[in-house]
Image (cartoon, rainbow, N blue to C red):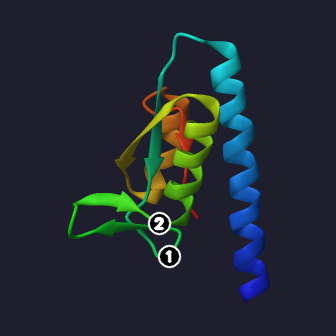
Amino acid sequence: MFAKSLCRVLLCSILATALGLGLIGASDAQQVVRVGSTPTGIPFTFLDTKTNQISGIMVDIIKEIGKDQGFTAEVSPMTFSTLIASLQANKIDVIAAA
């Protein structure tokens, strides 16, 4: 069970990195990357009730990629079922969820 979860995290991290690099390379003018994330995927993504913002491992990863690549990640809470549709409709640029 732990191995499966770890594999999911690593795969999502690699995909997020690849997407982040592709987004930055495609448009140097883009400084904010819109990230869709679920508030219910503890510990990967969750709603921090103290700050009322999405937190977790996946959010930390995309923010670190942003620091390295020179963009700011703007994380928006979404239900899991709407993530892909939001990506396809260009409402978000990256999915950071598990």
Q: On screen, 59 above or below 27?
A: below
Residue 6 drawn at (x, y percent): 73, 75
Residue 86 drawn at (x, y percent): 46, 37
Please tell me which residue is depicted at 71% across the width and 30% down the height of the picture. Answer: 21
Q: On screen, 31 above or below 76?
A: above
Q: Is residue 88 left or right of residue 50?
A: right
Residue 90 drawn at (x, y percent): 49, 26
Residue 85 drawn at (x, y percent): 50, 39
Asked which quadrant contains residue 12, the reply is bottom right
Report which residue position mark 2 lands on: 56
Contact check, label 1 and label 2, Cβ < 8 Å: yes
Where, quadrant-wise, is the C terminus in this rendering?
A: bottom right
Asked which quadrant contains residue 47, the reply is bottom left
Report which residue position mark 1 lands on: 43
Q: CA distance from mark 1 to mark 2?
A: 6 Å
First along the sequence among labels 1 and 2: 1
Q: Secondary structure at mark 1?
A: loop
Label 1 environment density (alpha carbons within 10 Å; few <14, some 14–19, many ≥20): few
Q: Is residue 57 left or right of residue 14?
A: left
**Residue 7 vs residue 48, the one in the foreground:** 48
Q: Is residue 19 left or right of residue 31?
A: right
Please tell me which residue is depicted at 64% across the width and 24% down the height of the picture. Answer: 23
Q: Which mark is residue 32?
A: none
The amino acid on which the numbered mark 2 sits, given as a three-letter code, is Gly
